[in-house]
Amino acid sequence: MATMITEECINCGACEPECPNEAISEGEDIYVIDPNLCTECVGFHDYEACQAVCPVECCIPDPNNSETEEVLLDRVRKIHADKDFPALGELPANLSRFRK
Ligand code: SF4
Ligand code: SF4
């Protein structure tokens, strides 16, 4: 599931610099997440960094965009081609919310 921002967003901007994939930007009315860049922070954190700083907790899993940990790990690899990530079977618990 990519993460999405709901209309509760108050446009504070706190989430934007926290995203390891630069997936968040200011939209027309509220901040938005590019689902092609969001990995639910897989590869970096065991939590969604945007949700962790959001004062109104409006960064939630998109119920219409369910994705596996494998898909998200493949995505983070492509986004950060210069960086090494562990294989799916060796991914440590602190790099994926799926392992909590
Ligand atoms: S869940 Fe992580 S990767 Fe996705 S938009 Fe939020 S901070 Fe970025
Ligand atoms: S931190 Fe939350 S309220 Fe602030 S811009 Fe991001 S989604 Fe909107």
Image: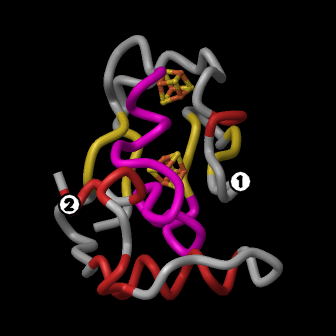
In the image, is residue 50 above or below residue 53?
below
Q: Which residues are magenta?
A: 34-53
Q: Is mark 2 within 8 Å of ligand 1?
A: no
Residue for point 42% across, 77% down: 72
Residue for point 44% across, 87% down: 87
Tag nearer the camera, 1 or 2: 2
Under circle 1, the secondary element is loop
- Which sits in the foreground, 32 or 23? 23
Q: Is mark 1 within 8 Å of ligand 1?
A: yes
- Do the residues bearing badges 1 and 2 touch, measured as CB atoms within 8 Å? no
User: Outermost residue, right direction?
Assistant: 82
The N terminus: image quadrant? bottom left
- Which sits in the foreground, 100 or 79? 100
- Which sits in the foreground, 7 or 67? 67
Residue for point 39% across, 32% down: 51
Q: Residue 83, position in %: x, y?
A: 74, 75
- Which sits in the foreground, 84 or 78? 84
Q: Residue 8, position in %: x, y?
A: 35, 24
Q: Say the numbered circle drawn on residue 13.
A: none
Residue where numbered disc 2 is placed: 99
Residue 84 found in image quarter:
bottom right
